[in-house]
Amino acid sequence: MHWRALPWVLALSLSACSETDPEPQDPRPLRVVLFPYIPDAAGDGFASLKQRLEADFERKHTDIDVDIVFDANLDVYDLNEGGQLSELLGSGSNAAQVVEIDTLIMGDLVSKGWVRPVPLTSGDSHPAAEQAVTISGQSYGVPTYLCSYVVYSHSPDLSSATDGASLVQILSDYAPVAIPLTANYSGSWTLPSSYLDAWADTNPTGALSQALALPLDAPTVSSFETVVKSCTLESGANPCLDGTFSDGTQVERGFAMGQANGFMGYTERLFFARQANPEMPLPEVISVPLGTGSAPTVFVDALVVNAQCTGTCAEDAQAFTDFMKDPAVRSLIAFSEDAPQGTSPRYLLQASQAFYQQEPARSDPMYQKYQTFLGGARPYPNQGFPENRRALQAALLEALQ
């Protein structure tokens, strides 16, 4: 080659390099809103959990910039057009691509067209969880948590309670304290859902959707009333029903300090009891028998994907939901691995079936006790509850008072 041709060849070579080496792309943003209704184990407003989840996800997906939001001021039960949930699952500046929701409202989200179908691997989650995220044969959510009303007590006879009456008798006999069973029944979501739990106990083979219709089921109300009125004080007041125990952790603190023989709530409320009294021995636990029998029911929380999130966005959203259902991630949250060593587990029930078969859950005394009653649990209905809850609440308040 003649030496005069070299500059031309070099220029061609450099030009070719500049055309084939693309500019580095910024990571694609993905906004995720997760439930803030879990124990803040690290006491930092979930900052440590947010940082840990974002870092672990982005380590595996360097092309995605995930922003995880924990915000108790966001009302993810607001089904009104123009409300906060419609904004989160919309296309505006406040939109999120993935939102964690309670499947009590799943049917409404689907009917409004706010969420898109998502793939679900059969067998990954508890059967009740798979049922709860399914509408007309199509899955619309990736299950994360189960929630169920349980009773915690130090009574050695707790496990022999088979219905509301025997539960109250066992707890009344345990120790001479003011309240055999403390709980919070107030509110248009809590009181009706407690009644549905009692209805399921009384009707172990019936579809829970039947419990949404009035009139109230008489045998269920009779048994439920026995349990609710066990919280009545000598003054005649019932702090479990009148709203006194609706905020804060009074129920858990009272139990932890020996002022109640038992307390009813979700499994994760044990975190607050142990926080109030770290020296308290781990209690016994059963699914609460509010009706004439005992048949566990579970709420299900799940990750849904914004209907506006399509194409690459949908692929990124699935990458995140796959990450969140990993048993290792479920253990991170359940066992407060984002908090300082020695912090109590959060005691959140996990929808992942593999979670219970792996350490540390496999050796944890409380998670193994939870498994004993989760096996045959039925899910709360994923359609009909929001629009019927206030009528149920009114009828129950009249019946109980």
Image (cartoon, helix red, strand yellow):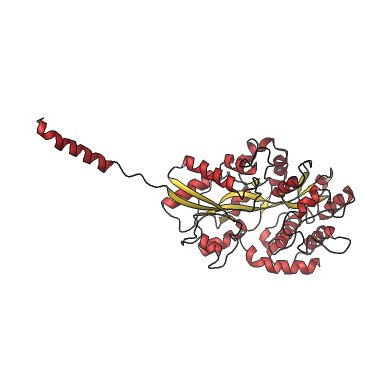
Position of 381 relative to 267 (above/below):
below
Question: Residue at the spot x=48%, y=58% of the render?
Answer: 307
Quadrant housing the C terminus:
bottom right
Instruction: Answer whether residue 233 is visible to the viewer in this image.
Output: yes
Residue 208 percent across, percent down from the top left: 68, 58
Question: Residue at the spot x=88%, y=47% of the render?
Answer: 174
Instruction: Answer whether residue 295 is visible to the viewer in this image.
Output: no
Q: Is residue 376 left or right of residue 239?
A: left
Examine the image and state in which quarter residue 136 appears. bottom right
Quadrant housing the N terminus:
top left
Residue 275 percent across, percent down from the top left: 73, 46
Q: Is residue 263 left or right of residue 87?
A: right
Q: Nearer the viewer, residue 317 or 356?
A: 317
Position of 84 relative to 1 (above/below):
below
Q: Is residue 244 left or right of residue 340?
A: right
Residue 169 percent across, percent down from the top left: 87, 52
Question: Residue at the spot x=52%, y=60% of the render?
Answer: 88
Disc count in the image?
0
Residue 55 percent across, percent down from the top left: 51, 42
Position of 339 relative to 221 (above/below):
above
Examine the image and state in which quarter residue 210 appears. bottom right
Q: Is residue 211 left or right of residue 55?
A: right
Q: Nearer the viewer, residue 273 or 182?
A: 273
